[in-house]
Image (spheres, helix red, strand yellow):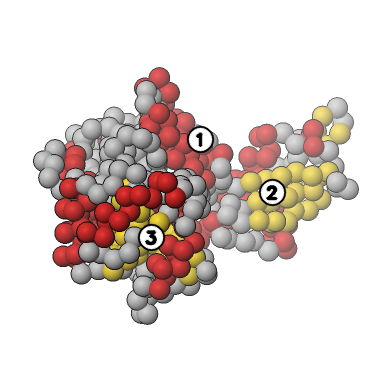
């Protein structure tokens, strides 16, 4: 069953993203006093009184504008309205009614959807003088809030959940696989999301940095449910000029933090770059599953060993993630995208994989017999036993006699022995060594 969908719409700079962040309970959408900051539909999961729903933020609607980027924003908002069960039409209680508000109201009336008129920026009685103007829209009584101050949000949400269709599912789902699509700007992240969904879910242009927020999209493939997070591309620090661009970098890192698996997209026409290694390094440090997707493979000029040479270069430069599978795709044509889902399922299963203590110690004992632990000045490392203490990512605690005797090369050897038996493709392994008695 699908979740109820709540969509926030309105003209630019009325506080839609501030309201979105307030309902979500965390800062997801970028908020600036600059019209047009939110360009795409931004999705997140929200909850009120134990009822879960999908919340969508949209770019500011300017029905009469003919600018290309504004037309794209309008199209994104129209798609959001089409999929919504409840629409929150946000207006500015300080500015009062505008002609753009009237135009948007006409669009919403034609949609036939449940529309709640939300009058924002009402911080005091003095600032509410203009609310009576909005009755002219014929949408109903304005619900007075201040998204910035958090005033009236509970009353608004009480009204929202009353309008959820009975056939929609409002229960919590803990089995969703969270996937962050990461990479530098203009590598094809948004194109991949759009290809998966079969619609223009995210604005795609050949201008780097079009996607400014981390954008959530729910998708079902076979029996599995996914949350895809399309992230703003990470640029080099010296290339970051605007505050909005800096916020986008923070959103990207936050998207990695709340994901289970990262798809690192590399531009096949450029090959692996220093920026790719930094992005991969952050995901690895956070213990995330990883798949490396080499995109734009349909336009790469190929010779006999082109893919082999590309893979070799990636392995050399991303030596710290040897576990990450590499796949060559075309987000534009959809080539091998179905194979990407097969890998996602494998990596997710490995992320959850747990090895029994008995089997783990059989592997460790065999490893010790095949390759004796290192020694220093007559003191030899002794390995007593190990146990798996966590998943997502898999973590193993191994009890030894002295920490200083555990050499990095032997630690890597033990990890490789574990991988030899259980694979753990796409997943980092954490080994923690404790002196017996710690």
Q: Is residue 80 above or below residue 59?
A: below
Q: Is residue 237 above or below residue 206?
A: above
Mark 2: give few (<14), some (14-19) or many (20+) Cα within 10 Å. some
| Image coordinates for residue 5, horizontal then vertical, percent | 35, 65
Q: Nearer the viewer, mark 1 or mark 2?
A: 1
Of 322 and 329, the residue lying toward us = 329
Q: What's the residue at 13%, 42% (across, down)?
A: 65
Q: What's the residue at 64%, 41% (across, down)?
A: 413
Q: Check disc 3 and report its element: helix, strand or loop.
A: strand
| Image coordinates for residue 324, horizontal then vertical, percent | 46, 45
Q: Is residue 157 above or below residue 417?
A: below
Q: Nearer the viewer, mark 3 or mark 1?
A: 3
Whether residue 115 sits left or right of residue 407 in the image: it is left
Per the image, the residue denoted by label 3 is 143
Per the image, the residue denoted by label 1 is 281
Whether residue 438 sits left or right of residue 327 in the image: it is right
Mark 1 and mark 3 in contact (Cβ < 8 Å)? no
Of marks 2 and 3, which one's residue comes earlier in the chain?
A: 3
Mark 3: give few (<14), some (14-19) or many (20+) Cα within 10 Å. some
Q: Nearer the viewer, mark 2 or mark 3?
A: 3
Q: What's the residue at 44%, 40% (across, down)?
A: 251
Q: What's the residue at 28%, 39% (across, down)?
A: 36
Image quarter in which the N terminus is found: bottom left
């Amino acid at each position: 069953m699908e979740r109820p969908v709540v969509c926030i719409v309105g003209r630019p700079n009325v506080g839609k993203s501030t309201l979105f962040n307030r309902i979500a309970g965390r800062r997801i959408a970028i908020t600036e006093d600059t019209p047009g900051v939110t360009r795409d539909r931004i999705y997140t999961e929200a909850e009120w009184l134990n009822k879960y729903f999908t919340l969508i933020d949209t770019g500011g609607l300017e029905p009469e504008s003919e600018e290309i980027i504004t037309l794209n924003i309008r199209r994104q908002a129209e798609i959001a309205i089409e999929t919504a069960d409840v629409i929150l039409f946000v207006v500015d209680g300080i500015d009062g009614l505008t002609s753009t508000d009237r135009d948007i109201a006409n669009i919403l009336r034609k949609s036939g959807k449940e529309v709640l008129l939300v009058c924002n920026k009402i911080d005091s009685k003095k600032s509410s003088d203009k609310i009576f103007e909005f009755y002219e829209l014929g949408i109903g009584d304005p619900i007075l809030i201040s998204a910035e101050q958090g005033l009236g949000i509970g009353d608004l949400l009480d009204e929202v959940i009353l309008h959820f269709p009975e056939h929609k599912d409002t229960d919590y789902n803990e089995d969703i696989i969270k996937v962050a699509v990461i990479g530098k700007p203009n590598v094809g992240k948004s194109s991949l999301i759009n290809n998966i969904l079969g619609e223009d879910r995210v604005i795609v242009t050949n201008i780097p940095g079009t996607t400014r927020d981390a954008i959530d999209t729910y998708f079902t493939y076979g029996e599995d449910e996914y949350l895809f997070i399309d992230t703003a591309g990470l640029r080099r620090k010296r290339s970051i000029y605007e505050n909005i661009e800096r916020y986008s970098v923070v959103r990207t890192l936050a998207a990695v933090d709340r994901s289970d698996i990262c798809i690192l997209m590399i531009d096949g026409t450029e090959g692996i770059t220093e920026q790719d290694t930094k992005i991969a390094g952050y995901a690895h440090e956070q213990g995330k599953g990883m798949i490396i997707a080499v995109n734009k493979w349909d336009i790469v000029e190929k010779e006999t060993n082109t893919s082999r040479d590309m893979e070799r270069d990636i392995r050399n430069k991303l030596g710290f993630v040897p576990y990450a599978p590499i796949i060559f795709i075309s987000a534009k044509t959809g080539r091998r995208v179905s194979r990407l889902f097969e890998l996602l399922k494998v990596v997710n299963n490995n992320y959850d994989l747990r090895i029994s203590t008995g089997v783990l110690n059989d592997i460790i004992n065999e490893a010790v017999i095949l390759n004796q632990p290192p020694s220093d000045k007559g003191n030899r490392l002794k390995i007593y036993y190990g146990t798996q203490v966590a998943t997502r990512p898999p973590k193993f605690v191994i009890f030894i006699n002295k920490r200083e005797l555990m050499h990095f090369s032997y630690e890597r050897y033990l990890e490789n022995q574990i991988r030899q038996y259980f694979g753990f493709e796409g997943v980092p392994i954490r080994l923690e060594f404790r002196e017996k008695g710690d």
